[in-house]
Image: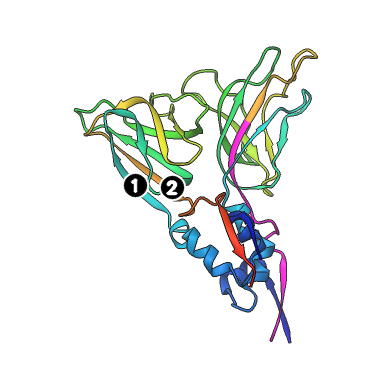
Amino acid sequence: MSSNTTLAQGLDQANPNRLCDILQKLGLGTLLTPKTAHIHGDTTVYLPLDPPALAVTSVRVVNPGAGTGVSGSYLVQDAGGTAVDWSGANAPGFCLLSADGTTLEFATALALVDYAEVCYIPRTTTDITETFNFTSV
Amino acid sequence: MSSNTTLAQALDQANPNRIADILQKVKLGTMLTPRTTTFTPASSQKDVTLDPPALMITSVRATRGAGGSQVAGPYLVQDVGGTVRDNGGGANTPGACTLSADGTTLTFNANWSNGLGAAPTDTCIVCYVPRSYTDLTETFNITGE
């Protein structure tokens, strides 16, 4: 006999016979290791996050001179918000995090020489909403 | 033989004979599933209630519809000792709301409005990571084997 549920449900249930399998899929050690990513621009408004983010704790854009990005601190909104450039010491910019945690979107494209320092907590290695087949033991 | 400890301490110790019981109380799967919740609070409310409570808020954004009273735009989250304020209405002027210590309540400066008898207009979009299903400071009884 087997049953299908999501990884999240399986982890909530914490069946000792399946717990190791579930934890191996989730990559909990990676998730609990805060990450600082140094990501260069690619002449688009998008920056990729790999691994995807569960929660972004800070974003800072650096424009070394020849770039196009606007240097400064950025706050994060959901994808439905409006991206805004940094505008001054007390006027942070806003970037948007995609629902799947893989992409930050800025108002101005970042050139190849621009980069962003992104501090964040990664998501689980396998999508936690993915179906997991539990074979009874 | 038994001993009392907090759920957090028990999770730190990760006794293989008890880890499944502990994780069932924490509901780690729910905790690790990021949530995006859209609220349409009643017009007299300044608060929105988060269920499950939040461990960490990643973003708060208000939208304003016809007849609404909230100022649209992003909001920063502070502890309850902070001062709430409306979004400044400009591109770089976030508002501020507060999160209760138990992670259940976001409080804003202005009441929310549902418009003039029409369908709800103002909304609040909150992205967050939930906290443990059972309070991690709750006492957990470890019975020895």
As drawn, A34 above or below B80: below
Question: Residue shown at 33%/35% (left/top)?
Answer: A61
Which part of the image, by quadrant, shows the N terminus of chain B? bottom right
Picture colour scheme? rainbow
Give x and y (percent) for residue A1. Answer: 66, 66
Instruction: Please give the residue where the numbered disc 2 appears in the rendered image.
Output: A120
Q: Could you tell me which secondary element the residue under label 1 belongs to?
A: strand
Chain letter behind tag 1 = A
Mark 1 and mark 2 in contact (Cβ < 8 Å)? yes
Q: Amino acid at mark 1?
A: Ala
Chain letter behind tag 2 = A
Q: With B102 as the anchor, is B58 left or right in this view?
A: left
Give x and y (percent) for residue B99. Answer: 64, 41
User: Is residue B140 magenta-colored?
Assistant: yes
Q: Amino acid at mark 2?
A: Tyr
Label 2 Cα crowd, 10 Å radius (few <14 / some 14-19 / many 20+): many
As drawn, B78 above or below B3: above
